[in-house]
Image (tube, rainbow, N blue to C red):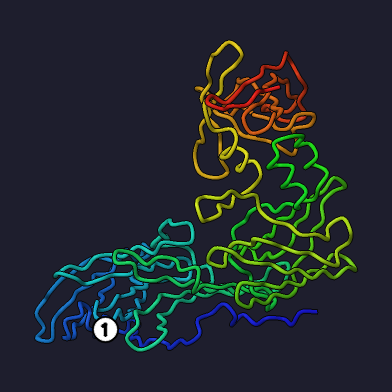
Amino acid sequence: MFPRAAAAVLTLVAEFAVAAHAAQISGVAPTLDADLDGDGASETVTAAPSRGSVRLEVRDAAGRALADAKAAAPAGSVVPVTLTSGPLGSAGALIEVVAATDAMECRTIWRYRAGQLSPIPIRGPSGQALPDCAAPSGWTASWVREGDGRPAAWVREKAQKVDAGTLRTREAYGFAGFSLDFDAKRSSADVAGVPIPSWYPATLYSRKALDTLYSRFRLEEMRGEPTLRIEADRARGIFALRFAGPDGPLVAPVDAYAVSGGTATLGARAGERSGQVSIRLGGDGSIPYEVRVEGLGPQWDRAYSPAGAWRGAGRQVFLGAEDELASEDFVGIWADSAGRTTPIALEGEPPYRLRVGKEGYSIDLRGAAPFDALLLPLDTPGRSWGIVLKGHNGLERIPVACTGKPPRPPCRADGPPETLRRTGARINVR
């Protein structure tokens, strides 16, 4: 049984709460004193609330006005305002303005520089800016420093009930010059005391399945092998092993987690069975590169790895076998027996789509029987194709009719096969 890891595993090693000045409306507009521009002299910020906005004003030590701006506030009546500051060292300090009611909270970050007050967006895990105003959702925010002289991070935390217990989420945002950006390494989440890592969500395959994939022959044999996805969803408080196999799925929630160096160990339970999982992490520690499962039964107990390809001295990891096949095998110029050519190119971000001539396709492996793969049109109407691989430089393309709507498996042959050969390849296609 693995020891239950504490949430502190993923939190900052040393944190010091930043001294912040806050004031609520009490007949006087709240003020804050800080060296905002890093010139060694202190400025004073005043926040004067009004209906639907907060007027910010910066003055120097002599009381001279330096800059002003309007910050967001809930519409309607004048509401309480709080000011806090986050030191940035020699770069000065940031200002947080919070104007809130029970139904709406407006939170903005500001920087004073070169005689101007400018808003600083807060960019979340997806890269999108958080809204200035939103209904209260249980977050509490503060400025946190790792040590003296270090720039403060803006940190928000929340605790909520989920199916697995209490989910505690901590999101850290670091100053990036013109924005506060989500910092995954300084953020964390745990559910029922078990930390949830931030890992690349690749599908993992057995060694036998990967050998079949890389051979480019008889890919239907892959469908007899299990696959594994490690679902680590911090937003929903889910940390589980999700297996899929020919006899159905298995879900094993993770109940223990520890990491040492480049190796993570998990405990997972499915019914009466208790599994032990050892994971070799690659990249920056966010990619499960080799996963060994024991204790969940002979159908699932084995080693799993993601589909990958070498790029010089480094290894590229794909979200799934479909992306590996698209990137490493399908891309190129293909010619038929009459010499007519068809270009195939990648399109978009993973999961990849293929552009075959002028048409766009998704790739399906799991539902492709009796073919190796299916190319399903992104636009309807469009022709679906069954693909039978002939090594790395040849394939058969068979028109198929699919009974799903839009065209989806199951699919059957609906015309004669056409043999294609990659142009420039020095092999015979049979």
Instruction: Tell me the amino acid under the disc marked 1.
Output: Leu
> Which residue is at 59% across, 72% downward?
189
Question: On the picture, is 177 further left or further right than 166?
Answer: left
* Quarter of the view holding residue 177: bottom left
Report the number of numbered marks: 1
Residue 379 vertical placement versus 348 (above, below): above
Q: Position of residue 250 (x, y in %)?
A: 82, 56
Q: Position of residue 405 (x, y in %)?
A: 70, 27
> Which residue is at 18% across, 85% downward?
42
Q: Which residue is mark 1?
A: 32
Residue 17 vertical placement versus 223 (above, below): below
> Which residue is at 62% across, 56% downward?
201
Mark 1 secondary-structure assignment: strand
* Quarter of the view holding residue 178: bottom left
* Quarter of the view holding residue 305: bottom right
Of all residues, the one furthest to the top in this rendering is 338
Q: Position of residue 8 (x, y in %)?
A: 59, 82
Residue 51 appearing in the image: no
Q: Position of residue 81 (x, y in %)?
A: 34, 76
The front one of 209 and 368 is 209
Question: On the picture, is 99 further left or further right than 365?
Answer: left
Question: On the picture, is 171 further left or further right than 107?
Answer: right
Quarter placement of the C terminus: top right
Residue 418 appearing in the image: yes
Question: On the picture, is 247 further left or further right than 362?
Answer: right
Residue 366 vertical placement versus 360 (above, below): below
Q: Residues within 10 Å of mark 1 (few under 14, many from 20)?
A: many
The front one of 56 and 408 is 408
Quarter placement of the N terminus: bottom right
> Which residue is at 36% across, 76% downward?
80
The front one of 200 and 55 is 200
The front one of 83 and 334 is 334
